[in-house]
Image (tube, rainbow, N blue to C red):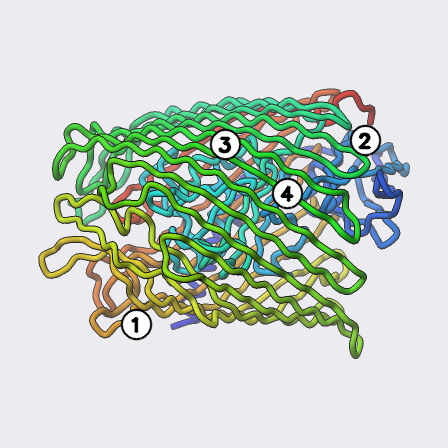
Amino acid sequence: MFLEGVSRVVRRPIRSLGVAALALTVMAGSRSAGGQVPGELRGLVSDATAGRAIAGARIDIAGRVEPARSDADGSFVVRGLEPHAYAVTIYAVGYAALRRDITIENGRTTTLDVSLEPLPKPLGAVVSSATRAETNEFAFDRPSIDASGRRDVGELIAAVPGLVVTRAGGPGQPAHASIRGSSASEVLVVVDGVILNSPLTGVADLSQLTLASIERVTVLEGGQSSRYGGRALAGAIVVETRRARRDASFGIDAGSWGERALSATLGGGSTASGLLSAERRSTRDDFPYDVPAVRGGGTARRANAGATTTSVLAVGGLDGPAGSLRARADWRSTSRGVAGSVVQPSLTGRDDERHVSASLDLASNPGPLSVDGSASVSHERAHLSDPTPPFGTPYDDRLSANEARVASAAALTGPHTAATIGGDARLVAVRSTALTSASPPSQRITGAYAALRATCEALGSEISGAFNGRVDRDDLLAGTAVSPRASLELTRGWASLSGSIGDGYSPPSLADQFFHEGVLVKANPSLAPERTRGEAELRAAVRELTLGVVTLRGDAAVYRADVHGMILWAPDFRFIWSPLNVDVRRSGWQLGGRLAAPTFFGAAIDGGVDHTDVTYASAAQSGQVIYRPRVTAHVSESMALRLQMRVDAQTRYVGSRRTVAGTDLNSLDPYWLTDLHLSVPIARAAWRLDGVFGVENVFDRPASMLVDFPFGGRRWTVGLRTSRRTLGESG
């Protein structure tokens, strides 16, 4: 059964990608100039403040999929570059990225020596150069975001194995993340230290995070309560907005279903710097979809599903000899129809949301001892209404939420050890007509954490051990929540073996406890927090193994993370829906890998499979937890063709979802979707101009619906991107 399942998962994506790659290669094939001889790029990466070499810096060259890395002395070399102009970006953890334009001449060596400016370390943001084969992290930096062709964070992270993004019916509609079979309220989403999860429902809507203003997205799988506290029971998604630096870019997009988008980013300065980024995206309010046989079959049109999202980010930075300061303000607005499900469609439902936040971050310059501090405030307003709903009485609900947060941390780093201590405090005030009068008007949450990491050499191997612990106090919960986690890693050459064990928790939301009673709906004020105890993971990895012109990377992991008291909404004997605590068994395994051939058009193939069992532990219930897929998988390939043309293809698979074991009752069929993205350079002068073309659901596969919210069929997008990465600088 297992081999047959894997065969079905892998066979279709590979066939789809093969056809797609062949088609695009024929479409985009280009000729190299006669008599050209490849050249090379050499250089040195150093710290602009201390003057020391920076090891492990990443050197991204536009048009090449596989980056280069600087050696221990800061030097790097990239061979086999075709003679023409390139945009080069240098990244290093803790430093501002630097972009330069260079020209490779016929058979010649070009030298590029750069000095990177240290960056402030915003509290709560995870900045890591670790690859997927090294940790349980997936990281998307600015170049990969640009190359993805995606619109929002939900679309960007949908290919992470073990992570399922559920979107309520189409582009612009709410998008929620589940990690390893979790509830969406068990995944914490943090944007520059500000929590995105709704103070009402505990769920984060990823569709509101458009990508023009985002620098980096990191997905942390597995319990993260030992660092981030509540809501990180199954994982965390950490979003960092763009930094103030010399930068300019503009984009325009158009696509099917009336999609339109405009984006712009402009920044400048050195010691004192600033950046302004804005994006507006809209889609039409209807699209066609296939009606499943159980609903009568045929085709229909989704109505009242239009959406408009606008976001503005302003950033200012000041760097000095002792440290740095960063001020940030952002504003987001979303207006969309609430179309309802296929069973209960609505033509009059509306959802209008506004969010504004501001933060101030202070950081000392990197050294043995560093101190950081931050403060932020945010305001959220939402209005959901439907004067003529298909079921129940009309509603007109409003939400107003305010939050203030302060945090600080100190880190001490030595040759073989690193220690961090920190704490944060939040005050949240929520008013909503959807809550009963018994709902508390405010909530205070305080937490303190500590982390210790040590490494040593023994028997030709490196041994690393880490301990993280956090204590949280929530005035809506009895007692304190303690979340420890310990890990151990053994590395020898290109292979590593690691293991971890820890606890986590997620509190009930205000809606779970105090939602006003309606037709067939009743809240439960006596709910207990969800908890994991002894969540364990074991992982083996192969890191950057070079075999001739090919590099390999891979990893395999097994995990177990039973949830004590998962909060699930279910009907009682009167068919009144109410939340209750249910014990759930959660365990699974993951396989992932990457094959890259940098000298062969920069080609790379990534793939992964995740199998998660999420089953009821209660004798009164049985089978798989509702709509949690057991198997998810992805295969993606990238290829940089001649003249910096780039092709990206991605196939993702979501297995069947079933609610009752041994029967087809309420089951949802598996689906797989293939997307293509093509970037074509048009001009490479002081300003770069690129044309982009994307097709989603290339083979127009009818995807099964998630809880009766339909997917549309094939979609296309075209656009133009222009940028000048190094204002005021020569190449």
Label 4 SS: strand
4 vs 1, front mark: 4
Tell me residue 450's x, y (percent).
Answer: 61, 60
Q: CA distance from mark 3 to mark 1?
A: 41 Å
Residue for point 31% across, 39% down: 169
Which quarter shows the N terminus? Answer: bottom left
Amino acid type assigned to the residue bearing label 3 in the image: Ser
Q: Residue at x 86, y 37 (%)?
A: 112
Q: Amino acid at mark 2?
A: Ile
User: Amino acid under label 1?
Assistant: Ala
Label 2: element kind: strand
**Marks 4 and 1, Cα distance to the nearest angstrom?**
43 Å
Label 1 crowd (10 A; few <14 / some 14-19 / many >=20): some
Q: Nearer the viewer, residue 473 or 153?
A: 473
Figure quadrant of the C terminus: top right
**Label 2 vs label 4, nearer the camera:** 4
Between residues 475 and 129, which one lies in front from this camera angle? 475
Residue projecting furthest to the bottom? 459
Instruction: Please give the label number shown on residue 373.
Output: 4
Residue 399 in view in this figure: yes
Q: How many marks?
A: 4
For label 4, the crowd category at 10 Å Cα-Cα, with few meaning under 14, some 14 to 19 and many 20 or more, is many
Sooner in the amino-acid sequence: mark 3 or mark 4: 3
Q: Residue 357's mark? A: 3
Label ID, residue 153? none
Residue type at the position of mark 4: Gly
Discs 3/1, front: 3
| Circle 2 residue | 102
User: Going from the N terminus, do you reach mark 2 or mark 3 first?
Assistant: 2
The percent coordinates of residue 714 (x first, y second) are: 39, 37
